[in-house]
Image (tube, rainbow, N blue to C red):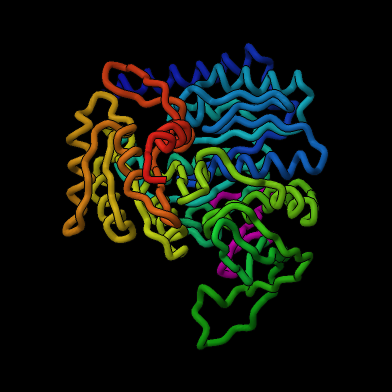
Amino acid sequence: MFLFDLIKNIYHFLWAFFSALFCGFPSRHLKVIGITGTKGKSTVSEMISKILEEADFRVASLDSIKIKVDKNEEENLFKMTTPGRGYLQTFLKRATKAHCHYAIIEITSEGILQHRQKFINFDTVVFTNLSPEHIERHGSFENYRAAKGKLFKENKKNHILNLDDANIDYFLQFPAEKKIGFTLKDSPKGTDKIIKGKDLKIKEMGSEFFVEIYSSHYEPQQSNPETPASNQNEITVKDKLSSEKIELKLPGVFNVYNALCATAVGFSQNISLSICKRALEKIEGVPGRMEMVIKEPFKVIVDYAHTPDSLKEVYETLRNQNSKLICVLGSCGGGRDKWKRPKMGEIAAKYCDEIIITNEDPYDEDPLQIMKQVASGIKSKKHYLILDRREAINKALSLANANDIVVITGKGCEPWMCVANGKKIPWDDREIAREEFKKISHF
C-alpha cells in the first residue's frame, strides 16, 4: 500500500510539473490568487473578481460555478471545484494570452493531495473558514486541515486569513511577507492589517455594515507579574486607515464574512476601500448561492449548502424572516462523509416546518439508504422521503402558501446529478423549481 501511494504521489507531482512545463509556466506572468476553505470559496471568488474589475484589471477565474477569462465565460461542467493539473495550466495560459492581470482559482484539499496547485506561483492565498468535511478521504479532521495548510506553507507572499475561525492559530503559524486578517469580532491576532466589520444589520435579503481597515503594529509591554507570560512580550496597537459603509444585496452573516474576505484581498492589491465598496454593492447575487428563483406568491431559494455548518447558516438566515420554512435536502456525495447525514436531518428538524428528504448525488451508493440515514437525525418531526428529486421539489412547492419560504439545498447551480456507474443526469435545481412551479394549481 505504501509503495502504491508513493507511485501515485510521484505520478501526480510529475503530471503537474510537465503540464506547467508544456504551458511555459504561465503563472509567472500573472498574479494568481488561490482560495481555500470549507465554505464560501465560490462567492469569495466572484466578489474578488468584481473588485479587481472595478479597479480596471482584466481577470480570469476558475471556481465551481464558472470558468471566466476576461469577458469570456462558460459554465463549469466538471462537477469538480479544482480541475486537473493539465486543465489548470492550460487555463492560466489562456489567461496570459488574453492579457489578464489576475487569475483566481479555488483550491480544494483533494486538489492539494494530488498536487494540482504545484508549479503555480501564487501571489495571494486565502483562508475562508474550516469545518469537518471529506473526513473519510483524509482520515481525520487534522489531516484535512493539514492539507489546506500546505497552500500557506508553500506560498509566503500574501496570506488572507479569517481571524474568527476556530482554526486561525494553525494558519497564522505559516510565515508570509504580508498577513491581512478579517473579523467581525475584533480578533487581536497577529496580522499586519485587519479588515473589521462592525455595526452589522441583517436585512431580509441583504445586510448593511461598516468596514474599517486598521494597520497593526506592536509595542513592548512592560513586565507585569499579574499578566500571563504569553501576553507580556507585546501588545497590539491599531491605527484606523479608512472606513466605509457597505450595503450588500446578499443575505446572511456568512456573506458578510465573504465580503470582508474579498475586501482584504483587494486591500492586499492596493485597491482602495471605496472601490471595494462600489464593486460589492453592484453584486445582485451569486448563482446557486442563496439564489431566489421565485419571488411571489412565496419565495423559492436554491443554495449549495452541503455541510452541517452551511445548512445551519442558511436556515438561520431564512428562519429570521418569520415565515414558514419548507426544506428540501439530501446528503450529497455517495460513499463519503456518512457521519454528516443524521446531523443534516437534526438541523432540518430544528429549523424547518416541513421537511422533504430526497436524492442528491448518490454515485454508486443506494440513494434510499442515504435518505434514511439523513432521516435518522429527525426524532419527532413529521417528514417526507421522496426518492425522485423533481417530485420532492414539486411536493415542497405544493405545501407552500403565500409568504412561505421553500429552500432547496445541496446542489445549487450544479449541472449534473451523479448516479451509479459513472452516469451523469443533466440537472439544475433552479430550472426544475421553475418548471414544477408552473404545474401547481393552487395559485
Q: Is residue 253 above or below residue 141?
A: below
* Residue 237 placement (x, y as % from top left): 69, 73
Residue 230 included in the magenta stretch of the image: no
- Within the image, what quadrant is residue 71 found in? top right
Principal secondary structure, stretch drawn in magenta: loop
Closer to the camera, 37 or 367? 367
Count of labels shown? 0
Rendering coords of residue 341 (x, y %) = 26, 45
Dividing the image into 4 quarters, which one contains the C terminus? Answer: top left
- Is 8 placed left or right of 202 in the picture? left
Indicate left or right for 392 with 227 as reference: left
Q: Position of residue 29 (x, y in %)?
A: 75, 26
Q: Nearer the viewer, residue 139 or 177?
A: 139
Query: What is the residue that sits farthest to the front in this orientation?
Result: 442
Name the quadrant of the N terminus.
top left
Is 329 displayed left or right of 245 in the figure?
left
**Residue 46 found in image quarter:** top right
- x, y percentage for residue 109? 44, 36
The residues colored magenta run 173-193
217 to 36, vertically: above or below: below
Q: Quadrant of residue 207?
A: bottom right
* Residue ID at (50%, 47%): 290
Q: Nearer the viewer, residue 131 or 235?
A: 131
At 44% from the left and 50% from the top, the residue drawn is 130
Q: Residue at x 20, y 54 (%)?
A: 382
Q: State whether residue 418 appears in this view.
A: yes
